[in-house]
């Protein structure tokens, strides 16, 4: 039986057990018991029936407490009250991401009726001669005519590209989570949607777009930046789309590097998992461009970061950029906790510094896996076989689901220790953590310089 069908069967078994044993419970109570039984069964890799003992109590509060203690043993041992997020669970084969469908070759490319889109459209026609091209009045009109996008549309988003003229929201401050210590980062909104498919990606929560959206009028960004930039600013792409994954077609990096070559006291970052660095290597930069990679152990990449380059490929690309005179950055974000995580991240960090001299590293961020509650159901619907949701993830200080505080603290302390072993001068910072965590691990916000 395929593993995805296995998860659907597991849920069916749980539903049958709940119906047979807890028929007197109301809808909400059944929902919570169903989820806890399913998650315990999946986490422990046992049949749901094995959890239901012969003399299982019939009192709801006792049942729930027993199941919570089994599902969240670490949290239960360190907190008196555990309040998990227990939404309804539904699994359908039609909503699952097709891992076997690799590569990027859009079938349909929609171009807004704007002169600015002609050059980018021409590049797509050369790269994808079999694609069908359509002219539309505007992206807004298209979305109004095609409402009701669903998860299955998000799964197929690589089949569709929209080439548009950006009119607003050119830049924004990084949407740092409420209550966290911000790093002062700014985002250049150059596109929306990623051709990679990481099962933890927050973009899955935006199922209102059935394709990759790319702006054609990059000059407008530079015009707007004059009134937006400030001395010492760090600004970059990679928040809503990988910075370089499609750069051989969009060629965004060429004018960006050229523009920022003339901008003093401003640092621009290309944030990526890609190894598409041909244009970057050929560009003439002024030292204020940082190329940064998201890193995880290869086992985490294999299980969670689908369609992305390997760890070895990413580190090799970083080394090539260093050899061309660039500073590089690295983002251990999200750090994924699992049995044996420490050993694998230690090997990754040692491998990193075997290739990259610390003096070439602009900054390194660390952030543990966290996400808005609604994303939990999207992840399990698209990737029912995932293991990242098996760990203990509870509402944190910002209501995002996170590992328990003490567990996160231990992860950060160990990561900082492993990184600092290679250099005491690294610019290390936490991503989206509150000040108490910074204080606990004795870390302060570094001064980022252009």
Image (cartoon, rainbow, N blue to C red):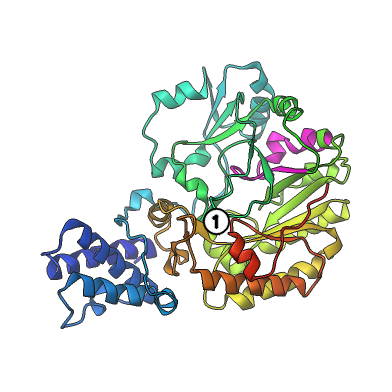
Q: Is residue 211 left or right of residue 215?
A: left
Q: Residues within 10 Å of mark 1 (few under 14, many from 20)?
A: some
**Quadrant housing residue 133:** top right
Residue 131 x, y percent position in the rendering:
55, 31
Q: Is residue 95 left or right of residue 359?
A: left
- Taking depth in this image into account, of 421 and 443 the one nearest to the observer is 443
Which quadrant of the rendered structure holds the N terminus? bottom left
Q: Can you see residue 317?
A: no
In the displayed structure, would residue 45 be above or below residue 110? Answer: below
All told, the count of numbered labels is 1
Determine if the magenta segment contains residue 256: yes
Q: Is residue 175 left or right of residue 154?
A: right
Residue segment shown in magenta: 233-258
In the displayed structure, would residue 202 be above or below residue 364? Answer: above
- Taking depth in this image into account, of 143 and 125 the one nearest to the observer is 143
Residue 383 x, y percent position in the rendering:
43, 57
Which residue is painted at 71% across and 52% down in the image?
A: 275
**Quadrant housing residue 305:** bottom right
Residue 90 x, y percent position in the rendering:
30, 55
Q: Which residue is mark 1?
A: 306
Which residue is painted at 57% across and 23% down in the image?
A: 111
Q: Can you see residue 106?
A: yes
Give the structural element (helix, strand or loop) at label 1: strand
**Quadrant housing residue 412:** bottom right
Which residue is painted at 41% across and 63% down in the image?
A: 385
- Taking depth in this image into account, of 126 and 15 the one nearest to the observer is 15
Residue 89 x, y percent position in the rendering:
30, 57
């Amino acid at each position: 039986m395929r593993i995805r069908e296995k998860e659907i069967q597991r849920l069916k078994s749980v539903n049958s057990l709940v119906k047979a044993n807890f028929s007197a419970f109301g809808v909400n109570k059944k929902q919570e018991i169903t989820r806890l039984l399913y998650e315990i069964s999946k986490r422990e890799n046992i049949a749901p029936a094995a959890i239901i003992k012969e003399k299982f109590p019939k009192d709801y509060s006792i049942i729930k407490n027993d199941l919570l203690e089994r599902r969240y043993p670490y949290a239960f041992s360190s907190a008196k009250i555990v309040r998990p997020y227990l939404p309804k669970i539904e699994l359908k084969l039609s909503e699952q991401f097709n891992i076997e469908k690799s590569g990027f070759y859009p079938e349909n490319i929609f171009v807004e009726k704007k002169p600015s889109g002609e050059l980018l459209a021409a590049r797509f026609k050369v790269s994808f001669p079999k694609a069908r091209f359509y002219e539309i009045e505007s992206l807004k009109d298209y979305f109004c005519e095609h409402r009701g996008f669903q998860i299955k549309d998000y799964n197929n988003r690589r089949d569709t590209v929209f080439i548009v003229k950006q009119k607003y929201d050119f830049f924004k401050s990084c949407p740092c989570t409420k209550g966290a210590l911000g790093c002062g980062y700014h985002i250049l909104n150059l596109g929306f949607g990623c051709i990679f498919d990481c099962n933890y990606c927050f973009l899955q929560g935006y199922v209102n777009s059935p394709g990759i959206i790319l702006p054609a009028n990059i000059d407008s960004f530079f015009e707007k930046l004059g009134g937006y930039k400030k001395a010492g600013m760090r600004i970059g792409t990679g928040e809503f789309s990988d910075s370089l994954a499609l750069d051989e077609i969009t060629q965004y990096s060429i004018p960006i590097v050229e523009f920022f070559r003339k901008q003093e006291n401003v640092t621009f970052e290309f944030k990526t998992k890609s190894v598409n660095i041909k244009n970057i290597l050929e560009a003439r930069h002024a030292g204020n461009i940082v190329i940064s990679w998201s890193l995880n152990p290869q086992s985490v990449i294999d299980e969670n970061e689908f369609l992305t380059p390997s760890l070895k490929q990413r580190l090799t690309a970083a080394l090539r950029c260093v050899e061309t005179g660039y500073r590089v950055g690295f983002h251990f974000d999200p750090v994924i906790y699992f049995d044996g995580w420490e050993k694998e991240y230690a090997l990754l960090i040692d491998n990193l510094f075997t290739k990259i001299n610390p003096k070439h590293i602009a900054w390194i961020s660390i952030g543990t896996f966290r996400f808005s509650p609604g994303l939990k159901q999207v992840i399990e619907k698209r990737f029912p076989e995932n293991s990242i949701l098996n760990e203990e993830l509870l509402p944190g200080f910002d209501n995002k689901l996170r590992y328990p505080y003490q567990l996160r603290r231990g992860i950060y302390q160990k990561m900082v220790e492993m990184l600092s072993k290679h250099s005491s001068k690294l610019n290390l910072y936490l991503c989206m953590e509150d000040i108490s965590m910074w204080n606990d691990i004795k870390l302060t916000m570094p001064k980022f310089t252009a």
